[in-house]
Image (cartoon, rainbow, N blue to C red):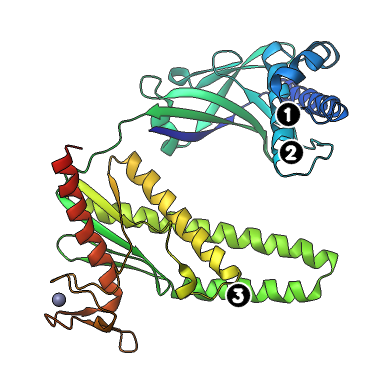
Amino acid sequence: MELIRTIRLKLLVSPEQASELNASLKANRDALNFASQVAFDHGGISAYKRLQPLTYHRLREKFGLKSQMACNVCSTVAGTYASAKSNGRLLLANFTHSKLVYSYNRDYTIQPASQTLSLGTLSKRIKVPYLVGEYYQPYLHHEMWTFGSAELVPTRKGFSLHVTVKREIAEPLSRDCDAMIGVDRGMNFLAVATNQMDEVMFFKGRSIKDKKATFVRQRKELQRKGTRSAKRKLKQVAGRENRFMTDVNHQVANEIITFAKCSGSHPCIVLEDLTNINLNTVVRLNDRYWRFSWAFAQLETFIRYKAFAEGIPVLSVSAKYSSQRCPKCGHTAKANRDKKRHRFECKKCHYQLNDDLIGARNIRERGVEKRHQNEVAGA
Ligand SMILES: [Zn+2]
């Protein structure tokens, strides 16, 4: 699997270099709009190979673009029409912001030792000192990371370069694990995690629910109004809500990783497979349905990615009856759970537990079984 990171470098440009970069950005934006018009006039060309011969020489002569920049313009425009076609809405694409993409070694290089980078502009290559956050420092090692494309981004005070770095690492194996962490996702608690020592970590959903309720109220009001400005505001609210949930999911995923690392030296995380679960039983089928399922799927992506980066394997297990099964004797019955009293009591062996914990415990147990099966299968 490939690990991808984006690192931000703040460029310390001289006034002269700033005007060089601004000129490049402007030429690039004009070139994008020119190529966009050509592509549109030909029925919305969405293939790079068709657009390139039609525009390349004019991009070079009319806008003074370097060879690689001209190619990047063609692929950006072709890509834009490809996604417009798949959305079924073919309109003339207008680029109000410049998107200046650089390829490593061809039009930019980085020298971490001297904290400088070399960047191509329309007229020449410029050498620019940069600042980088401590957090990003490790990613600048050429031996460990491969540099990919970079994007020049104008900021309020100057310019940043967003550099993509990649690294191929082996999928972590669950074979040598000394700790198992079961993670249950739900409505009352966003997530409940438990380890092999029965230590528990709850991530309360209450404050998130309250905050989400505020968003829902705001949206309903705006929907009722239905004016154009209300529609615009609706979009803003939806954006804020998504950013809020993304933030929360990042935090929860980080805490789960920390909890896993504290549970053993080779932890393994177990998640229930939610791809086929029917959330209708919990939430009525309205827009809360997809909001929750979206949030759960995102949390899983974050957990998997962060775990992978830490070399922690993640197992998926069946979600079936994970809230009805007795984690001690395996007896599965609806009657085991008393939802009103928030208690779980096994009708067979009388094992008792707080019902919020049942899911995570069962998921953990299934993870242990799955690891044994993998071991037998030699994986
Ligand atoms: Zn039991």
Residue 157 point in image, percent of width and height: 67, 38
Indicate which disc residue 214 carries.
3
Camera sees residue 121? no
Report the disc number at residue 85.
Answer: 2
**Label 1 to label 2: alpha-carbon separation:** 8 Å
Badge 3 local density, few (<14 within 10 Å), some, or many (20+)? few
Quarter of the view holding residue 239: bottom right
The image quarter in which residue 126 lies: top right
Looking at the rendered structure, the kind of residue marked 3 is Thr
For the view shown, which residue lies furthest in the right direction? Answer: 41
- C-alpha gap between disc 1 and disc 3: 42 Å
The structure residue drawn at horizontal position 73% and vertical position 76%, both measured from the top left corner, is 221
Circles 1, 3 touching at the beta carbon (< 8 Å):
no
Q: In front: 257, or 284? A: 284
Residue 68, horizontal then vertical, whole percent? 67, 15
Q: Quadrant of the N terminus?
A: top left
**Regarding mark 3 in the picture, which secondary structure is present there?**
helix
Quarter of the picture containing the C terminus is top left
Badge 1, how many Cα within 10 Å: few under 14, some, many 20+? many
Query: Of marks 1 and 3, which one's residue comes earlier in the chain?
Result: 1
Tag shown at residue 46: 1
Q: Is the shortest distance between ligand 1 and the CB of mark 2 under 8 Å? A: no
The percent coordinates of residue 117 (x first, y second) are 55, 19
Secondary structure under badge 2? helix
Is mark 1 in CB contact (under 8 Å) with mark 2?
Answer: yes
Q: Considering the numbered disc 1 on the image, is that residue within a helix, a strand or a loop?
A: loop
**Which amino acid does the dot numbered 1 rest on?**
Ser
Q: Is residue 90 above or below residue 240?
A: above
At horizontal 38% and vertical 31% (from top left) the residue drawn is 138
Q: Residues within 10 Å of mark 2 (few under 14, many from 20)?
A: some
Per the model, the C-alpha gap separating discs 2 and 3 is 36 Å
